Image (cartoon, rainbow, N blue to C red):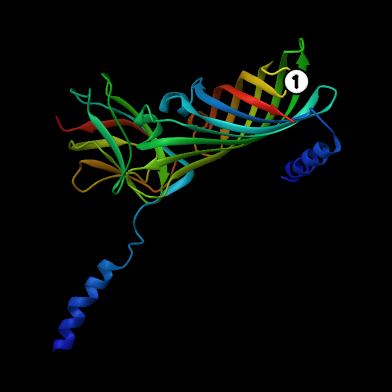
């Protein structure tokens, strides 16, 4: 927790110590699909939603970013996920990035990070929602293509692997793994506004 | 006399109107799972439902061999595994599980864990 607070202080302080063309605001569309053998893969459809983030490049091509993602889905198998509906996925994460510039227009970025996740589902029987909190770790890549000449508007797209681990505990290790560890494949497409 | 009448009539009503603290609620970050096998001549395609009173937690149907698996959100209070057929006997991973009075369901303890019912014998 303290490390994360430190990052929060670190990011803005580094931001304002730099002058130009280093910082960007990103808006994107997202999809999250469960892969492997877990309750998200078997119990829900693909989540679609949006994401917003802020990135800064500080040392050469290394940088940091913070991001908020949201996805909406439906239950595909009641016997796995339970009689719930409209599950919502919320992910908040902080990550490190490295950018490799191919040419003036095109570059690639590698991301590694982690944060918090929450899966919230609605019920037909109670107003209160059923929530499953957890941690996530992710690895991903992005392709960046500059739309404008001065690199102020950049088209961003790429895949990511999210490894979600919820706080759910059970007496059986195999079933606990099934209901608490989920791998999500994420695709995003968005715009990055540099300033 | 009238006083006594009012008391005897109104007191129970106030109990009924009072917010019911015995309703089951969802428990965040918890899951319940049940699996089992129905061993009788016609074991396929039997609906199996898991309730916490009025909350339907999960539902499924048995496969051709009579196996079923279901999981759902954890709740407070006891759950019932409803088969809607007369159950003669069953074996369970949890000794606290018991047969309901009408023998149509199995009452599961309040824990949100994995339960196994390797053998559920139904009345033919």
For numbered disc 1, what is the local secondary structure? loop
Q: Callout 1: 10 Å neighbours few (<14), some, many (20+)?
A: few
Question: Which residue is under mark 1?
Answer: A150
Question: Which quadrant would the N terminus of chain A be assigned to in this image?
Answer: top right
Residue A45 horizontal side relative to residue B91, left or right:
right
Residue B83 horizontal side relative to residue A62, left or right:
left
The residue at 57%/22% (across/down) is A188
The residue at 73%/41% (across/down) is A4
Closer-to-camera residue (A68/A84) = A68
- Indicate the position of residue B30 as horizontal and vertical percent values: 47, 42
Question: From the viewer's perspective, is residue A59 above or below residue A88?
Answer: above
Closer-to-camera residue (B31/A90) = A90
The answer to whether residue B33 of the structure is visible from this angle is no
The answer to whether residue B74 of the structure is visible from this angle is yes
Question: From the viewer's perspective, is residue A128 above or below residue B11?
Answer: above
Return the residue found at the far front.
A149
Question: Which quadrant would the C terminus of chain A be assigned to in this image?
Answer: top right
- Indicate the position of residue B34 as horizontal and vertical percent values: 37, 34
Give residue A149's quadrant in the image.
Answer: top right
- Indicate the position of residue A63 as horizontal and vertical percent values: 78, 28
Q: Chain of mark 1?
A: A
Residue B26 horizontal side relative to residue A110, left or right:
left
The residue at 78%/38% (across/down) is A11
Q: Across the whole image, how many numbered discs are drawn on residues?
A: 1
Return the residue found at the far top.
A103
Residue B87 horizontal side relative to residue A28, left or right:
left
């Amino acid at each position: 927790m303290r490390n994360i607070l430190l990052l929060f202080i670190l990011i803005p302080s580094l931001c304002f110590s730099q002058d130009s063309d280093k910082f960007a605001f990103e808006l994107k569309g997202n999809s999250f699909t469960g892969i492997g053998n877990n309750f998200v893969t078997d119990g829900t459809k693909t989540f679609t939603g949006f994401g917003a983030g802020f990135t800064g490049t500080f040392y050469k091509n290394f940088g940091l970013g913070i991001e908020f993602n949201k996805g909406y889905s439906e239950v595909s198998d009641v016997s796995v996920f339970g009689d719930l509906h409209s599950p919502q996925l919320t992910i908040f994460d902080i990550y490190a990035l490295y950018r490799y510039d191919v040419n003036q227009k095109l570059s690639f970025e590698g991301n590694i990070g982690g944060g918090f996740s929450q899966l919230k589902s609605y019920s037909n029987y109670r107003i209160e929602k059923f929530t499953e909190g957890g941690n996530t770790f992710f690895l991903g890549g992005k392709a960046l293509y500059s739309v404008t000449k001065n690199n102020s508007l950049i088209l961003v797209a790429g895949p990511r692997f999210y490894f979600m681990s919820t706080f759910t505990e059970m007496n059986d290790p195999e079933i606990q793994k099934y209901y608490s560890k989920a791998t999500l494949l994420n695709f995003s497409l968005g715009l990055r506004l540099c300033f | 006399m009238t006083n006594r009448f009012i008391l005897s009539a109104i007191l129970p009503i106030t109990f009924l109107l009072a917010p019911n603290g015995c309703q089951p609620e969802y428990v965040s970050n918890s899951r319940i799972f049940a699996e089992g096998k129905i061993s009788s001549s016609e074991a396929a395609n039997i609906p199996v439902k898991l309730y916490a009173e009025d909350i339907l937690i999960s539902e499924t149907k048995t496969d051709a061999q009579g196996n079923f698996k279901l999981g759902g959100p954890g709740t407070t209070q006891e759950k019932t595994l409803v088969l809607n057929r007369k159950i003669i006997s069953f074996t369970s991973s949890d000794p606290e599980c018991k047969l309901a009075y009408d023998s149509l369901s199995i009452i599961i303890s309040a824990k949100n864990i994995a339960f196994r019912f390797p053998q559920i014998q139904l009345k033919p």
